[in-house]
Image (tube, coloured by chain):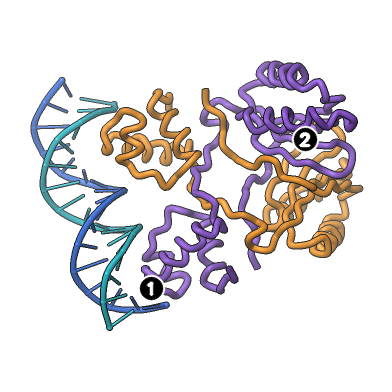
Chain colours: A orange, B purple, C cyan, D blue
Amino acid sequence: MALTKADRDIIKLMQQDATITLNELAERVGLSPSSAQRRLQKLRDDKVILRDVSIVDPKKVGTAVSMLVEVELERDRPELMPPFLRWVADTPEVQEAWGTSGRGDFTLVILVQSVEHFDVLADRMMEMNPNVRKFTTSVVLKTLKRTLAVHIE
Amino acid sequence: MALTKADRDIIKLMQQDATITLNELAERVGLSPSSAQRRLQKLRDDKVILRDVSIVDPKKVGTAVSMLVEVELERDRPELMPPFLRWVADTPEVQEAWGTSGRGDFTLVILVQSVEHFDVLADRMMEMNPNVRKFTTSVVLKTLKRTLAVHIE
DNA sequence: GATGAAAAGTAGTGACC
DNA sequence: GGTCACTACTTTTCATC
């Protein structure tokens, strides 16, 4: 699964614009269209490229409040961990979630329509997860940058 | 720019899988392929859908350390704000950045190859931005969820 | 073992109703 | 918004290195 220069170039280009045609892609990485397509297919088969998605502007669909939430769990109730993980997975307003060292146990990025929606969501989180000891919320005032693109040298 | 039911369905589907064909898309939203394509094109023209990108598995390209960084800036030097914003925009290892209320002024998601790379990056951040008063770093131990998909009712 | 050229199949586009 | 014809893109085949 070693990546060639062409593979890395394909990844870079596809992370910027996945609607690029194979002809364009091929030209820019210095391969024929059929070679480029085979490499791309292999990158998908090997799960280097996981999927292609459309990026939507939240403001344009009436969903404009982002929150960063640090959640602290009770460590002495490990049996309540899986339900919490399931809640994270099943709650579409939770866009991102990391388990971290440092202050909080988990950091969540939550995107909702309004502060009222967030209130409801936070209440439900507490209700469904008695192992949530406390959480601190930071309101996002300005989103400077948002990408899942991985930097490739 | 009011969104129809079909528009919202198109957005939902495209956020999951942007490689879907117009035939499939049309069928699943209850339109003809060319109608679906017109709506999709309008969503792109109106910047509701900003772009399509490939999602890459960082582990598969040798980039496996994520950090959450809270940065506190000196408030009495507003002239140094633009350079900081430019540093964020121009540093590909910074995947996400928000300006927040609460403790830190900014929260960054940084993805690097190794802790050593992070050290170099953090040093350079301090060097290039004398208005960074302090920053606290949380190492990501586990990534539970990662999507930019916006939840649409 | 991967490449490129070309053929065959499929999907996207635009004019018209 | 739907139908249809046209164009463009993708995929497979096959010969080659």
Q: Is residue B97 visible?
A: yes
x and y percent of residue A17 in the render?
Answer: 46, 43
Viewer-closest of B84 and A119: B84
- Vertical side of D14 occupied by A31: above or below: above
Q: Chain of mark 1?
A: B
Residue at 48% from the left image edge and 63% from the top image edge: B42
Q: What's the mark number on residue A83?
A: none
x and y percent of residue B75 in the render?
Answer: 88, 32
Badge 1 and badge 2 both on one subunit:
no
Dot 1 crowding, Cα within 10 Å, few <14, some 14–19, many 20+ = some
Residue A122 lies in quadrant: bottom right
- Residue, disc 2: A100
Viewer-closest of A91 and A111: A111
Residue at 39% from the left image edge and 24% from the top image edge: A4
Quadrant assignment for the N terminus of chain A: top left
Residue at 73% from the left image edge and 49% from the top image edge: A85
Q: Give the mark toward the camera: 1 or 2.
A: 1
Q: Is residue B86 left or right of residue A54?
A: right
x and y percent of residue B80 in the render?
Answer: 79, 27
Dot 2 crowding, Cα within 10 Å, few <14, some 14–19, many 20+ = many
Q: Is residue D8 left or right of residue B148?
A: left
Q: Is residue A148 left or right of residue A22?
A: right
Mark 1 in CB contact with mark 2 (< 8 angstroms): no
x and y percent of residue A114 in the render?
Answer: 78, 62
- Vertical side of B2 occupied by A121: above or below: above
- Residue, disc 1: B32
Residue B85 lies in quadrant: top right
Residue B92 lies in quadrant: top right
Viewer-closest of B29 and B97: B97
Amino acid type assigned to the residue bearing label 1 in the image: Ser
Q: Chain of mark 2?
A: A
